[in-house]
Amino acid sequence: MWLHLRRRLSWPLLFIAAAAWAQGTVPEPPADAPAADTLDEAAKPPEEAAPEEKTPTDELPAEQAAQLRDAFDSVALQENATAARTIIGEIDNPAITENAWHAFYVEFFATRAFTAGHAAFWEFALREGGIPAGPARAPASCRFAFEAVAAAARKTPPDYESLGRALAWLDRAGPAVAGPQMEAVAEALREAFTPPLELGLLLAPPGTPGLQAAIQAALSLSPFLPPPAFVKFVILPGTGGPFYARHGVFLFDGGALDEAQLQSLGSLLAAFPPQLHAAIAVLVPDGLGANAAQLGLVTSRPILEIAPLPMEVTSNPGEFIPRVGQTAAPEFTLAAATQLLRIIQRVQFTARPDLALRRDALLARAGPRRERYLRRTIAPELYLSNPDELLPLTGYLWILDSARAFHMAMELLDIRLGEAADALLLLADMLSGGGGSTLLFRTDALGRVSSQETPLRRVLATPDLAYVTGLGVDGTLWAFQLNVRGGAVRCFRE
């Protein structure tokens, strides 16, 4: 049979005949069918019919929507592979537009919540499904969570449990979104939060978990839009919106900070490159009634907690010796700066562990002798019992007036007390972020902080350990001679 057909049919007709044979019905070839070995045209493949394309629609057909609802309801309660495959098939269906998904989820979450089962399903879809995760999976899971957040926050009262689970999923799925996917996710957020999501709605009535929910919502949603765009779709309580748009750091103060404090805090944040501290938020526990740990906030980035000290309370001018000039600034600003330096230290010591080794060696050299430290008002036992306090508390004076702090350390170096200079050089190295420049600061009587970059020079003591041997202050590069232990013994202008 196959030999007979091959002699008389072109290859396209042969395929047709083979298919018919497989079904048990083999038609006779047409009488006028040309022989394959006599006509070139017979060897040409036929034009394949274009596959039927599904027309994109902004609304799911009723039957399709019902199947999806049933599938999501099923996985919400328990593991169901069939339902999961149904959802995954639709997620990967390019004919379903973003508008159609939005409309479906608005209707879905009007009477439903984000459950632990939904999180398990999305984990299955992304990681455990045995199907190569398509490019639509991670953004689709974020869209699902955005719509759940919007619906939960707008209910009266808000559905805090659903909200918390949806935000937890965004914390989980967000890092899986990258490159071109991010714009799709950002668009999903914009669509879900139109009209804008008002986080203030979560704060009432009192006694609810609304404070935690509002702050956590800001933290979990922030990676998906830059600050100026974020505040158009997520309305932050109080002065939080303008502050976040300007500084890229959330502010939750419960109304505890006045305008002068806000201006001072803003200048402090503006004085530092954001990547140096990587802080995501400022909290004022006294105004909120709880701190970050008590609220159980989840974030991979640091949170700066400050006290609303009155601006009238100032630092002690006697921190500086008369020879270099004595100055003071609001304690609110300097205390906040010290807290920020603690965060910077954690970030930078993690990135550069050698800084901690050098700090510990410095403390071993200085010991309990008060005159070997820059701040004579602080007992050395504090540093020795808690080494992490050395650089932040030394930095208190560096933020107040770097030039005066430097010259005071040089006065001590002249009388062979070099540990204060060592601490400043280490602090300058930490504030460099490992680069070739560091920061000098000045804080005025109104608490306004300014900074400027200045050159910094290092020398390798070992292949893995570099010490600062040059620092620019007052427009002059000061060079340091170090001993074999890395301590400063002499300084001169270059």
Image: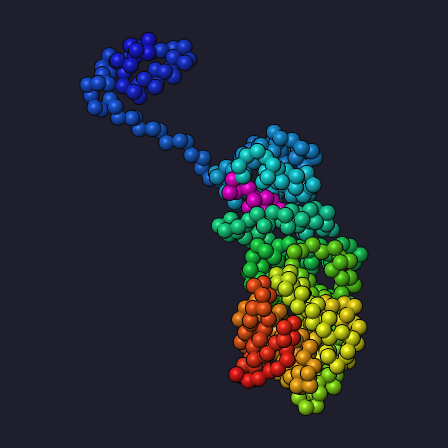
x and y, in percent, of residue 258 in the image: 71, 74
Where 384 sits versus 420, above or below? above
x and y, in percent, of residue 180 in the image: 48, 50
**121 magenta-colored:** no
- Nearer to us in this view, 430 or 165: 430
Please report the residue visible at 73 percent of the width from the left and 79 percent of the height from the top: 372
- Nearer to us in this view, 321 or 155: 321
- Residue 90: quarter of image: top right
- Nearer to us in this view, 255 or 302: 302
Q: Report the magenta residues as a range.
A: 134-146
- Residue 16: quarter of image: top left
Where 306 sits versus 62, above or below? below
Q: Is residue 311 visible?
A: no
- Residue 339: quarter of image: bottom right
x and y, in percent, of residue 134 in the image: 51, 40
Q: Is residue 490 visible?
A: yes
What's the magenta bit mostly, secondary-structure-wise? helix
Please report the residue visible at 55 percent of the width from the left and 46 percent of the height from the top: 139
Residue situated furthest bottom in the rendering: 323
- Nearer to us in this view, 292 or 94: 292
Please report the residue visible at 57 percent of the width from the left and 54 percent of the height from the top: 224
